[in-house]
Image (cartoon, grey):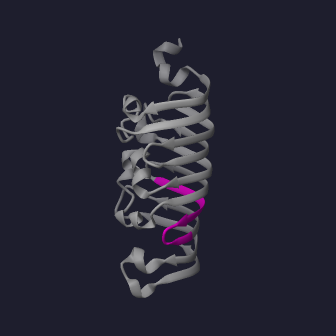
Amino acid sequence: DGFSDFVNKVDWEANFAEASVSTNDIKRLYSGIAPDMKLDLQSDFRGSLNDFTLYNLDLQSSNGLVINGDMRFRNLIEDSDNFKISGDLSRLSASNQRLKDILPDVLRNALPPELNQLGIISATGTFDVDANNLTTALTAKTALGGLKADLRLGRIQTDDMTYKGNIQAQGFDLGKIAGMPELGKITANLNVD
């Protein structure tokens, strides 16, 4: 009986050719999203409400967020402490604040305010995120310069966050984000552990 566990057992297939939704309506199912935004999207939806994939997603928000690609969402409604979001993005365009508008609370609170200095981030690549870890392989252009990150962040909800992977910077203004102008811009290939 699918109705006894509707959000997990009832599979959906839908094509959203031109859809608009208010985040106020989404908040009824997913409280982590910011209110009062309009989302315009096109996508193919497959899965249950608690484990679904948006294929060929083309999303634009009223506050300037753009996401293109495929994204999978698990446990956003039930068992949200064990949520997982993954994506293969052909385009992400957003500021730090716009990202915080759509991220689960645990991630929203983990992003440091220094990231606001990046301005609008234009990125492509893949990511997997859950309540404790973020794994990403992204190439990004920011207001401070170019970055390429193949990185795993662990314990992201703690003051003892771990970093492992590779970050490549191209003309990146490390001095500005670190609050030490004398550092200036760097071009580097860094392994972090």
Q: In the image, residue 24 lies at what x, y percent?
A: 36, 32
* Image coordinates for residue 155, horizontal then vertical, percent: 42, 58
Relative to 107, is 191 on the left or the right? right
Tell me residue 98's x, y (percent).
42, 51
Vertical position of residue 105 compared to residue 124: above or below: above
Task: Mark yes or no: residue 13 visible.
Answer: yes
Tell me if 161 is positioned left or right of 127 in this view.
left
182 or 127: nearer the viewer? 182
Our reading of the magenta stretch's main secondary structure is strand
Identified at 59% across, 28% down, the residue is 47
Magenta-tinted stretch:
133-146
In the image, is residue 103 above or below residue 182? above
- State the residue in front, 111 or 95: 95
Q: Residue extending furthest top?
A: 1
Residue found farthest to the bottom:
182
Q: Give the total number of marks visible in the rendering.
A: 0
**Is residue 73 located in the magenta-colored stretch of the structure?**
no
Image quadrant in which you'd find residue 123: bottom right
Q: Quadrant of residue 14?
A: top right
Q: Is residue 156 visible?
A: no
Q: Is residue 136 magenta?
A: yes
Measured as percent of width and height from the top left, residue 158 is found at 36, 59
Given residues 4 and 180, the one toward you in this image is 180
In terms of depth relative to the viewer, which is nearer, 126 or 121? Answer: 121
Residue at horizontal 60%, vertical 52%?
A: 91
